[in-house]
Every structure is written in structure tokens, then in C-alpha cells.
Amino acid sequence: MRGWLILVLGLFAMNAAAEDFTPRTLEHTGFANVLAESGKILIAGQPGENGLARAKAEGVTRIVNLRTPAEMSARDAPDEAAASKALGLDYVQIPLGGEDAPFTPAAVEQFAEAVESADGKVLLHCRSGRRASYLWAAWLVKYKGVPVHEAVDLARQVNFGTLPLEELLGKKLTITTE
């Protein structure tokens, strides 16, 4: 009987400790396309004029920008590093996307370090929120033990979009293995 009690209590403790990563959609005023929150991470499209100040008001202490140097050198791109510094926010750039900044495990590791070492919430963003959703899903799988299919489903709630194969086939695919 005592063994069963220990087993039941152990299972209860494991369930109580399980994190819920379900993103909460926020009004995205000040951000392009999307703003969602999951724990200490906000996932978004490009912050607009008031986006960084809004992020700070939401408790963000670190900005993680996935836009590439080419994107950031565009004529209309804000000087986000300077704007972040002016607001007292840490700024990290992890270029992601395209030939010069391919999707790699190193990007996931850099993001994990940025999240782990942050003193508050982290704003993860790219131009539209799509690459941010991809990186967040990969982080969930690699660092939080979320099964791939669940991480993809969670990221779809933000701005993961559809896989090109889904578009070609005209239907949503269910991902069940890693």
C-alpha cells in the first residue's frame, strides 16, 4: 500500500511541475502581425514605434531579434539596438533565415542561453513572427522536452503558418515523430 501511495504522489508531483506553454494571444498594437506570450517569452513580429516601450511595460528585459543584417540595413529598419539600449533593455541579435543565416542548432542554443540568462521576460521577434515561432518551437522541443507535434501545434497558435508540403497537398499534416 505504501508503494502505491509513493507512486501516486510522485505522479501528482510530476503533473504539478509540468509547464503549460500554451501561448496567450495579446493585442499586437505596436507589433507587426502578432504578439503572444508563453511563460517568460513574448513572440512577435517586428516591434513598431512604440513596441519596445510596450514590451518593457510587459516586463521584458531582453530583446532577441532574428532579423538578418540585410533586413536590418534596409532603409526603413529601425536602429533597434540603440532603441533597446535607450530603454534599458538587453539586446541580442541571432540572425535567422536565408543563405547567410541558415536555420541551425546553434541558433536554438543561443536563444536558450538568452532566455536562461535574462532577468525578466524575453521578447523574441522577427519581421512577421514566423521565424520567431519556428525558433520557439525548436526551443520547446530541445530544452523543454515538448514532443515535436505539440510544439508545432503550439507554434501554429502564434504564427507558425503552414509547411510548404501542406500547401502543396492542400491539407494540414499531423507530425507524430521526431
Image: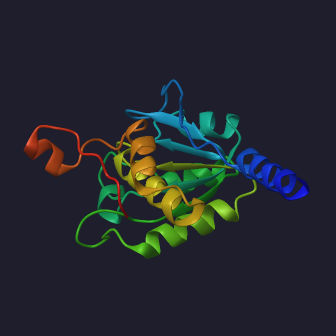
Which x, y percent locates residue 10?
80, 55
Q: In this view, does 145 lie to the left or right of 99?
A: right
State whether residue 35 is above or below residue 5: above
Which quarter of the rendering shows the C terminus? bottom left
Which x, y percent locates residue 26?
54, 27
Which x, y percent locates residue 167?
13, 42
Q: Is residue 140 left or right of residue 90?
A: left
Q: Do we see residue 104 in this rendering? A: yes
Q: Do we see residue 46 in this rendering? A: no
Q: Which of 78 and 126 is in front in this view?
A: 126
Which x, y percent locates residue 21?
58, 44
Write the residue at 55% across / 38% down.
Answer: 22
Colouring convention used in this rendered image of the protein: rainbow
Write the residue at 53% across / 37% down.
Answer: 23
Image mark count? 0
Q: Nearer the viewer, residue 176 or 24?
A: 176
Q: Residue furthest front?
A: 1
Q: Which residue lies furthest to the bottom in this view?
A: 106
Q: Nearer the viewer, residue 70 or 35?
A: 35
Write the residue at 22% across / 71% down.
Answer: 99
Location of residue 143 by image quarter: bottom right
State whether residue 2 is above or below residue 58: below
Write the residue at 63% across / 60% down.
Answer: 115
Q: Which residue lies furthest to the left in this view?
A: 168
Q: Is residue 106 left or right of residue 53?
A: left
